[in-house]
Amino acid sequence: HVQLVESGGGSVQAGGSLRLSCQASGDVFSNYCMGWFRQPAGKEREPVATIDSDYSTTYANSVKGRFTISKDNAKNILYLQMNSLKPEDTAMYYCGSCDFRFSGQGTQVTV
């Protein structure tokens, strides 16, 4: 049973930065495609960024050039560095497998 715990969310002014972390309970990131997703209040969940077992990455067009996904397989931690934050980035952010078969409880980001 995979457990994921997100942290690092908070309130920040437009133009600011935050780094989200996702701690996994075991060796997950070396075997699965993982991603960050977000769900603004009243809207559907959307993918933000993904990183595969070979470290290849994808980004939503809305965050390209501003967000960076990375992982530390040795520490079982997934990161999302978010720079130049905009009000439209406000959402609950989740980490999970790319198919969202498993995910964490989320961390709120408010810009």
Image: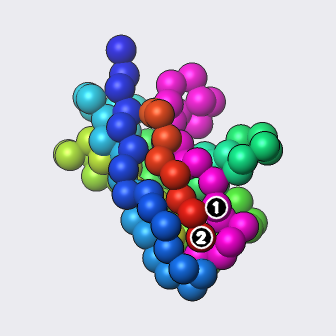
Residue 34 seen from this side: no
Q: Residue at x 39, y 44 (%)?
A: 6
Identify the magenta region.
83-103
- Name the element at disc 1: loop
Classify mark 2: residues with Cα within 10 Å, few (<14), some (14-19) or many (20+).
Answer: some
Expressed as whole percent of the image width and height from the top left, the position of residue 107 reads 47, 47
Extreme residue in the bottom direction: 15
Task: Find out whether the residues at labels 2 and 1 contact each other: C-beta distance under 8 Å.
Answer: yes
* Residue position marked by numbered label 1 in the rendering: 90
Q: Is residue 88 magenta?
A: yes
Classify mark 1: residues with Cα within 10 Å, few (<14), some (14-19) or many (20+).
Answer: some
Q: Which mark is residue 111?
A: 2
* For residue 90, side relative to residue 81 (left or right): right
Of labels 2 and 1, earlier in sequence is: 1
Expressed as whole percent of the image width and height from the top left, the position of residue 2 reads 36, 22
- Indicate whether 83 appears above or below 72: below
Q: Is residue 94 magenta?
A: yes
Extreme residue in the top direction: 1
Residue 44 seen from this side: yes
Expressed as whole percent of the image width and height from the top left, the position of residue 36 reads 54, 48
Q: Quadrant of residue 67?
A: bottom right
Q: Which mark is residue 37?
A: none
Q: Residue at x 30, y 41 (%)?
A: 23
Q: Residue at x 57, y 23 (%)?
A: 101
